[in-house]
Amino acid sequence: MPDYLEAIAKVIYREWKSAGQFTGKNHPDEESLACFAENKLSGKDKEIVQKHLISCNICAEYVSVQLKIQPHLSLDLPLPLEEKIKNMVIHGSKENLFEIFLKLKDKALEIIQTSGDVLVGQELIPAPVLRSRQINEFKEEISILKDIQQLRVLAKIQNKNSKKFSLAITVKDKLSQKTYKNLRITLIKDEIELESYMTDSGSSFFENIPPGDYLVEVSREGQKIAVIDLKVKA
Ligand SMILES: [Zn+2]
């Protein structure tokens, strides 16, 4: 399972657990939900869980993540519930996640995976389309963009010398294309904040970063509004 899905599952599980599942008052227990997601429930048990999922977003999200992790499973559900869960699977439970997974090569960058669109010349191309055109290698720098709610987040990554890279983050308003100036961009590794900048000048620059797994958080007045899951391999 991809790491970020695992992370999402953990967050949802925590929320769901803290929402009182173990008091047994409101939500079905973990095993019931897991069995439901695996289509192992039948009859009245299934009906009870189904009824609950229609009204409970926390449990529906939990099930949708399970289904995302194991997309081959198909459930025979009443239409409204199927729609609801399908929507959650499509839109993702954490819509503010922007995934970038790259490899530094000698004077080039290779896209392994991204949930953003890649800027090729003037054209924005989704990663699956790039794959189908068999484009995954870029000269020295790459720009990847993702719309997160009203934000347009642009990450520009440069391969410095195949051992270090640099990262520039720009956040614009999706509609007006104005650059946000009151945002904080923080580079995090292993839960430690390495560098943090305000977007006063429009972009935030992080230089000479060694390959590794990073999170880049975009926050406004202390509130996280977007997270870039950035993995760079050497
Ligand atoms: Zn519930």
Image: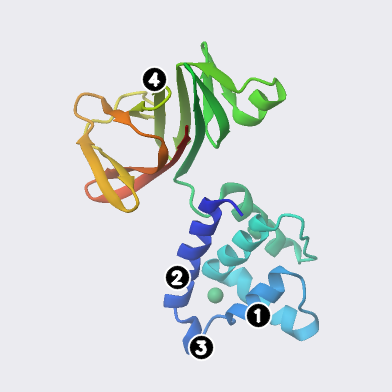
- Give the amino acid type for the residue marked by disc 3 in the picture: Lys
SS type, badge 4: loop
Q: As drawn, is 37 to the left or to the right of 91?
A: right
CA–CA distance in space, label 4 to label 2: 41 Å
Q: Do the residues labelled 4 and 3 touch (CB within 8 Å)?
A: no
Where, quadrant-wise, is the N terminus in this rendering? bottom right
Image point (31%, 24%), residue name? 178
- Circle 2: residue type: Arg
Residue density around tag 3, few if under 14, some if 14–19, many if 20 or more, within 10 Å: few
Q: Earlier in the sequence, mark 4 or mark 3?
A: 3
State the separation of the CA atoms marked 3 and 1. 14 Å
Q: Residue 161 carries which label?
A: 4
| Percent coordinates x, y for residue 188 in the rendering | 31, 45
Residue, disc 2: 14
Considering the numbered disc 1 on the image, is that residue within a helix, a strand or a loop? helix
The residue labelled by disc 3 is: 25
